[in-house]
Image (cartoon, helix red, strand yellow):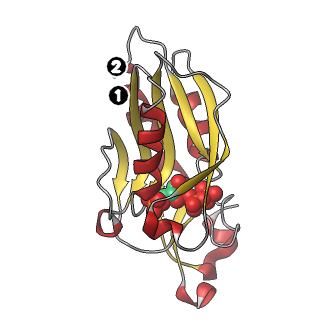
């Protein structure tokens, strides 16, 4: 689905499919350089990171292993408490491995902050984060992010894995949702 298919639902297109692919290529090149000679496990955080994982993995010109985690809140209080529940854990033992968490957005930072500590406690060789988007104005928890695609304003963005009520994930572009959709 392209932005043209849901024209009225978006205020604007922030990043086109082509811009996203170009950015992922840049990030992939940096990742290849930084992990040269090392084994690498990339961990996608369901469900939003599916698109980034698929395109990032294919942008890499080296071997990489892929695994997934699904996390959820303990209710409406979670985003403020920072408490996260694991719905699907890794299938991989990450002890001694280089782990790169891949997500599509860092908002408050609570999810990734919690996940980083959780994975670090499993004695990996390293844990780093790659996110396509980050909202600096929304951040409430400091997160050490090694690879960031773009910093964006604190607006409601959808597409390329990002949803509103489970819709828009399959939009090829990333756009700002029009207020009439959610108000
Ligand atoms: C999104 C995103 C991050 C998290 C970031 O997932 O994938 O994991 O929110 O938010 P935070 O920085 O405020 O913690 P979401 O909870 O929307 O689930 P989804 O990936 O299934 O859409």
For disc 2, the neighbor class at 10 Å (few under 14, some 14 to 19, many from 20) is few
Look at 37% across and 72% down and name the residue there: 154
Report, in whole angstroms, how far the alpha carbon at label 1 lies from the one at label 2: 5 Å
Residue 101 spot, x, y in % from top left: 48, 37
Residue 35 spot, x, y in % from top left: 38, 18
Look at 33% across and 43% down and name the residue there: 145
Using residue 100 as the reference point, say whether residue 88 is left or right of it. right
Residue 45 spot, x, y in % from top left: 58, 45
* Residue identified by numbered label 2: 33
Circles 1, 2 touching at the beta carbon (< 8 Å): yes
Judged from the image, the quadrant occupied by ligand 1 is bottom right
Image disc number at residue 56: none
For disc 1, the neighbor class at 10 Å (few under 14, some 14 to 19, many from 20) is some
Image disc number at residue 30: 1
Look at 34% across and 28% down and name the residue there: 30
Q: Nearer the viewer, residue 161 or 94?
A: 94
Look at 58% across and 91% down and name the residue there: 183
Residue 50 spot, x, y in % from top left: 64, 45
Q: Is residue 166 above or below residue 91?
A: below
Secondary structure of residue under mark 1:
helix
State whether residue 47 appears in this view: yes
State whether residue 16 appears in this view: no
Quadrant location, the N terminus:
bottom right
Secondary structure of residue under mark 2:
helix
């Amino acid at each position: 689905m392209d932005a043209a298919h849901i024209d009225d639902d978006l205020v604007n297109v922030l990043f086109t499919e082509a811009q996203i692919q170009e950015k992922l290529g840049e990030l992939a090149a940096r990742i290849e350089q930084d992990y040269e000679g090392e084994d690498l496990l990339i961990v996608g955080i369901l469900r939003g990171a599916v698109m980034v994982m698929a395109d990032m993995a294919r942008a890499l010109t080296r071997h990489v292993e892929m695994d997934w985690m699904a996390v959820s809140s303990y209710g409406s209080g979670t985003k403020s408490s920072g408490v996260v529940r694991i719905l699907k854990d890794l299938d991989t033992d990450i002890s001694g491995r280089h782990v790169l968490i891949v997500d599509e957005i860092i908002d408050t930072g609570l999810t990734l902050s919690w996940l980083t500590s959780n994975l670090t406690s499993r004695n990996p060789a390293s844990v780093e984060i790659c996110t396509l988007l980050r909202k600096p104005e929304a951040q409430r928890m400091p997160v050490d992010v090694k690879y960031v695609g773009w910093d964006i304003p604190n607006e409601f963005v959808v597409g390329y894995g990002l949803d509103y009520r489970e819709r828009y994930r399959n939009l090829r572009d990333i756009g700002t949702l029009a207020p009439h959709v959610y108000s």
